[in-house]
Amino acid sequence: MLQSWLNEFQGSQWKGEAELWLDPSGNDVDVSECILAIESRVLTYTWAYEGETKMGSFIFNDGGATWTDSWHQPEPVYCKYLSDAWGLFTVESSYSVPSGPDWGWRSKLSQRPDDSLVLQMTNIAPWGEEGRAVRMIVQRTDSDI
């Protein structure tokens, strides 16, 4: 599935809105414009926080992806590909928290029936509760539609 959607969308550009939730209850959202691009085995995106542009990417390989984001994750982290998950791709990683056990992070790209793409990022507490962190909803903007 990974290779098929990468081939299908290679060279495509997408634009829309990014939503960022920072409050623990997940009710307050910060909205900005975002751009997503897909080239070969790389998905890149830009978004903004407090007026400053942020950039991120997923570089796909056989077992997963390397993810970076200039705000969320400036150091590259390896994410494991979940082959049985719904959507175009789903990857997971974990990160250390000084005050306790590791937390999880899941990123997923889905395609809606209207052909828009949705990139979601979810924070996962050690006890299994998932909290929304990021959602980007984008429409294709290049001329290859």
Image: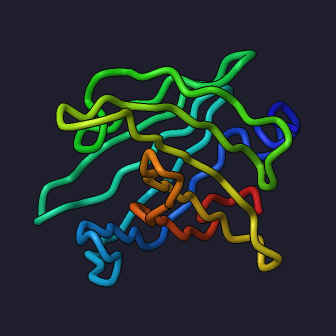
Residue pushed farthest top? 62
Residue at the spot x=49%, y=54% of the render? 121
Q: Where residue 16 sits: x, y (%)?
A: 47, 71
Residue at position x 46%, y 30% from top?
67
For residue 55, what is the image quadrant? Answer: top left
* 52 is higher (above) or lower (below) than 112: above
As rendered, which of 98 and 77 lies closer to the eye?
98
User: In the image, is residue 12 above or below residue 73?
Assistant: below
Q: What residue is at 77 percent from the left and 63 percent from the top?
A: 145
Residue 112 lies left or right of residue 93; in this view the side is right
- The residue closer to the viewer here, 116 or 29, is 29
User: Looking at the figure, which quarter contains the N terminus?
Assistant: top right
Residue drawn at (48%, 66%), measured in percent from left and top?
135
- Percent x, y for residue 133? 39, 61
Q: Is residue 140 left or right of residue 31?
A: right
Q: In this orientation, which residue lies closer to the viewer: 121 or 58?
A: 121
Closer-to-camera residue (116/76): 76
| Residue 74 horizontal side relative to residue 135, left or right | left
Query: At which x and y percent is residue 10?
Result: 72, 39
Q: Position of residue 52 (x, y in %)?
A: 13, 56
